[in-house]
Amino acid sequence: MSRPKTDIRLLAWHDLPAAIGLLTRLPVALPETVALRAAQAAWAYPLAGAVVGGLVAAAAWAALAAGLAPVVVAGLALALQAMITGGLHEDGLADCADGFWGGWTRERRLEIMKDSHIGTYGVLALLCVGGLRWAALGVLLGAALAPATLVAALVACAMASRAVMPVLMVALPNARGSGLSASVGQPRHATAVLAVLLAGCAAIALMGPGPALWVLGAAALGAVVVARLARAKIGGQTGDVLGASQQISELCILLALSAVLAG
């Protein structure tokens, strides 16, 4: 019996639930053939981000309306986001920090990244990046923005920070032959371009050209930093690297927006 061929269509109706099922813990129904489009469904990562960002933004706005302090709401928002995603991206950030700076060779770094235990570098990365995200989000929430502006900023941030992942999947080879990224596969260039266009157009529509450029530029900066480190340390990307790219890009976006919108 021959194996089914990989589905290489640019778009398919079940790409969005596939992206949501991969990047979040939200319950979605998937067809049995979804694995054939694991890589090509990466164009929908920004849409999965929009779902996450929308839920977090709605909860943050409700908490602010209830009278909670912005710094408290920021912490609750980040906690809710981690619950929705299952800490997937945070786990990648911690594993990359442990591996990149805990090993002296490529093989040892990959071995450390695969270990389920967390080390000193991973803890420090979570504390530093998480703390900065908390602080920047707290500033943004305390800027007395209109509810629509706040929701737009958080949704655009969530979309752009996830659009960088398919770009890294295309730009860097798989660093190992197994793992989440290797099992998903490498998408086509058109898939990554579509993800970026989707996030970019959404940012412009939600925030206007000026703030959108800050969002996209900050996301690109975070992605470039992670990509260069990954290439230097392990020669490519893994699922952990993709998760780290989301976290660092989100941090850069929040820092930029806290300066532009709340400055």
Image (cartoon, rainbow, N blue to C red):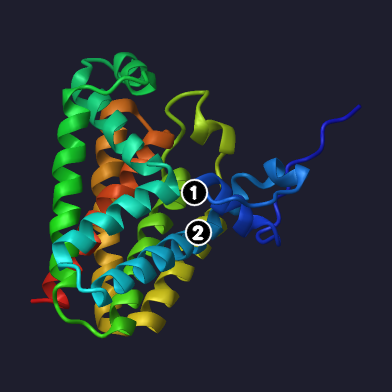
Give the x, y percent position of residue 71.
Answer: 14, 62
Q: Position of residue 128 (x, y in %)?
A: 13, 43
Q: How many marks?
A: 2
Mark 1 and mark 2: span between their CA atoms?
A: 8 Å
- The disc at residue 48 is 2
Tell me the kind of residue under disc 2: Ala
The answer, for residue 262, to whether it is visible in the render is: yes
Pick out the residue farthest to the right. Answer: 1
**Res 33 → quadrant:** top right
Is 12 situated left or right of 141 in this image?
right
Q: Answer yes or no: is residue 255 visible.
A: no
Q: Amino acid at mark 1?
A: Thr
Q: Nearer the viewer, residue 4 or 252?
A: 252
Between disc 1 and disc 2, the foreground one is 1
Name the quadrant containing residue 260.
bottom left
Question: What is the secondary structure assignment of the residue under circle 2?
Answer: helix
Q: Nearer the viewer, residue 212 or 125?
A: 125
Residue drawn at the location 54% of the way across and 51% of the way down:
26
Residue at image location 65% in from the left, 59% down from the top: 10
257 horizontally vs 78: left or right: left
Q: Secondary structure at mark 1?
A: loop
Q: Earlier in the sequence, mark 1 or mark 2?
A: 1
Residue 87's place in the image compared with 260, above or below, is: above
| Horizontal side, residue 141 vs residue 21: left or right | left
Q: In this orientation, which residue lies closer to the viewer: 186 or 165?
A: 165
Residue drawn at (27%, 33%) of the image: 94
Whether tag 1 and tag 2 are in contact, CB under 8 A, the answer is: yes
Residue denoted by label 1:
24
- Residue at (42, 33) in percent of width and height: 238
Q: Any mark on residue 194, and which?
A: none
Q: Which quadrant is home to the N terminus?
A: top right
